[in-house]
Image (spheres, helix red, strand yellow):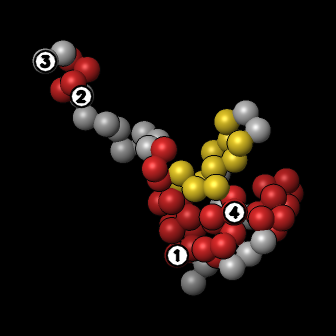
Amino acid sequence: MTRHDTLEPSATSLNPVDLLTTDQVATALGLSSRTLAAWRSSRSNSLPYVKTGSRVRYRSQDVVAWLETQL
């Protein structure tokens, strides 16, 4: 067993399965993808996202946490 095999994944590591597309988040929240794009552009909302190149993804746990702050 190598040292790499014994390391625990960090709590902040990204799992591709946990990443949602803009369309998936928009559908789940009952919004349009254009609304999410406008929020990102204007920084008028605190919904966190991950951007790699031109791709935007949302961590599922961030969406859940953000939604709970909206109650």
Classify the position of the C terminus by image quarter: bottom right
Q: Which residue is mark 1?
A: 68
Q: Quick check: can you spot residue 44?
A: no
Q: Which residue is mark 3?
A: 1
The local crowd at label 3, few if under 14, some if 14 to 19, many if 20 or more residues have their Cα within 10 Å, is few
Is there a contact, CB below 8 Å, between mark 3 and mark 2? no
Determine the CA span between mark 3 and mark 2. 11 Å
Determine the CA span between mark 3 and mark 4. 41 Å
Determine the CA span between mark 2 and mark 4. 34 Å
- Front in this rendered view, residue 56 or 48: 56
Residue 69 vs 3, above or below: the answer is below
- Front in this rendered view, residue 3 or 1: 1
Q: Position of residue 35 (x, y in %)?
A: 81, 68
Q: Position of residue 26 (x, y in %)?
A: 69, 69
Determine the CA span between mark 1 and mark 3. 42 Å
Q: Which residue is mark 4?
A: 23
Mark 4: amino acid = Asp
Q: Which residue is mark 2?
A: 7
Residue drawn at (74%, 75%) of the image:
31
The local crowd at label 1, few if under 14, some if 14 to 19, many if 20 or more residues have their Cα within 10 Å, is few
**First-in-chain label (1 vs 3):** 3
Mark 3: amino acid = Met
The local crowd at label 4, few if under 14, some if 14 to 19, many if 20 or more residues have their Cα within 10 Å, is some
